[in-house]
Amino acid sequence: LCEGALPNEAHKKLAALEKSGKLKAVITQNIDNLHQMAGSRNVLELHGSVYRNHCMKCGEFYDFAYVKNSRGVPRCARCGGIIKPDVVLYEEGLDPKTIQGAVRAISRADTLIIGGTSLVVYPAAGFIDYFSGKHLVVINKSETAKTVRAELTIAAPIGEILERIEVR
């Protein structure tokens, strides 16, 4: 839990692209809320967020600070139940509504930018199979594990590349 983390240039540029109407959705495996901090509104968090936490017994909501400042396993002040972050843990399934939203956004996209991912983690890595648009772009520091037929592949950090894009 890195409370001081701030959005980088990639997060900021994606938010600017959304604000200009050129970007419809951000689909992320990150759980850090940095896209929202940068200003993105339509963010599909495949693995949830550490900024949403609920008591597993009574459902009471707890913020990031409460969980971060807890000693040991966070407990509910109301009922004593365990507080769990809204994140997907190993062997847990992804939220069906989030999956549907991601598949819908990808299948309707004219251009899909895959960035900052190795395409190793499934089922997220398989979502690319729903893309039938015109332009596929991959921006990643290293080769991706899954072979994709990208029109453009850039081997560099996504923040460095996106910061060069001019949003009009």
Image (spheres, rainbow, N blue to C red):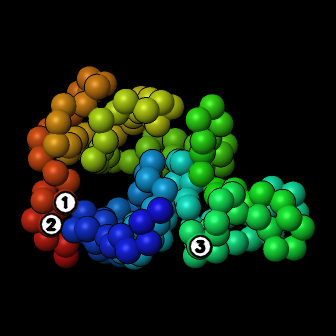
Q: Residue at x 47, y 62 (%)?
A: 1
Label 3: element kind: loop
Task: Name the residue beneath numbered marker 3.
Answer: 69
Quarter the C terminus occupies: bottom left
Task: Name the residue beneath numbered marker 2.
Answer: 163
- Total marks shown come to 3
Q: Position of residue 8 (x, y in %)?
A: 26, 68
Separation (CA) of disc 2 from disc 1: 6 Å
Task: Name the residue beneath numbered marker 1.
Answer: 159
Give yes or no for contact between labels 1 and 3 (Cβ–Cβ under 8 Å).
Answer: no
| Vertical side of 112 occupied by 53: above or below | below
Amino acid carrying mark 1 in the image:
Gly
Mark drawn on residue 11: none
How many residues crowd mark 3 within 10 Å: few (<14), some (14–19), many (20+)?
A: few
Q: Residue at x 70, y 63 (%)?
A: 74
Q: Position of residue 160 (x, y in %)?
A: 12, 59
Amino acid carrying mark 2 in the image:
Glu
How many residues crowd mark 1 within 10 Å: few (<14), some (14–19), many (20+)?
A: some
| Vertical side of 143 occupied by 98: above or below | below
